[in-house]
Image: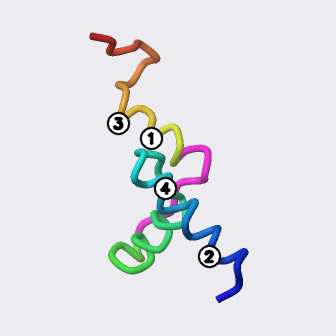
Amino acid sequence: MALRDQLSLWAENAKVILGVPSYRLYREHMARHHPERALMSEAEFFRNRQDARYGKGGGGKCC
């Protein structure tokens, strides 16, 4: 595996550990487990994950 590929995988794993969602992993999951469903766009996916994590409607959930 090329160094560039290794760094890319390392960066993606670090993002997952920090809670940053992976659109690539989402696409792979949907293809494997839910092929009949339409995929969200990358922007829709990001918004969906933000809403799930921080609450929908833009209101913060601080303390």
Nearer-N-terminus badge (1/4): 4
Q: Nearer the viewer, residue 50 or 9?
A: 9
Tell which tag, 3 or 4, sits nearer the viewer.
Answer: 4
**Quadrant of residue 62 in the image?**
top left
Q: Residue at x 67, y 77 (%)?
A: 5
Q: Which residue is mark 2?
A: 6
Secondary structure under the numbered disc 4 in the rendered image:
helix
Q: Which residue is mark 4?
A: 14
**How far separated are the C-alphas under marks 1 and 2?**
28 Å
Which residue bears the numbered disc 1? 48
**Residue span colored magenta:** 37-44
Element at badge 3? helix
| Quadrant (top left/top right/bottom left/bottom right) for the N terminus | bottom right
Residue at image position (45%, 41%) is: 48
Q: Residues within 10 Å of mark 4 (few under 14, many from 20)?
A: few
- Sequence-wise, the earlier of marks 3 and 4 is 4
Separation of residues labelled 2 and 3 (CA atoms) = 30 Å
Using the image, determine if residue 38 lies above or below residue 44. Answer: below
Whether 40 is among the magenta residues is: yes
The three-letter amino acid code for the residue at tag 4 is Ala
Q: Residue 52 has which mark? A: 3
Q: Amino acid under label 1?
A: Asn
| Image mark count | 4
Image x and y of residue 63, in percent: 27, 10
- Tell me what residue is drawn at x 41 percent, y 32 percent: 51
| Image coords of residue 10 (percent x, y) | 55, 66
Neighbourhood count class around disc 3 (C-alpha, 10 Å): few under 14, some 14–19, many 20 upward:
few
Q: Is residue 24 magenta?
A: no
Residue situated furthest bottom in the rendering:
1
| Foreground label between 1 and 2 | 2
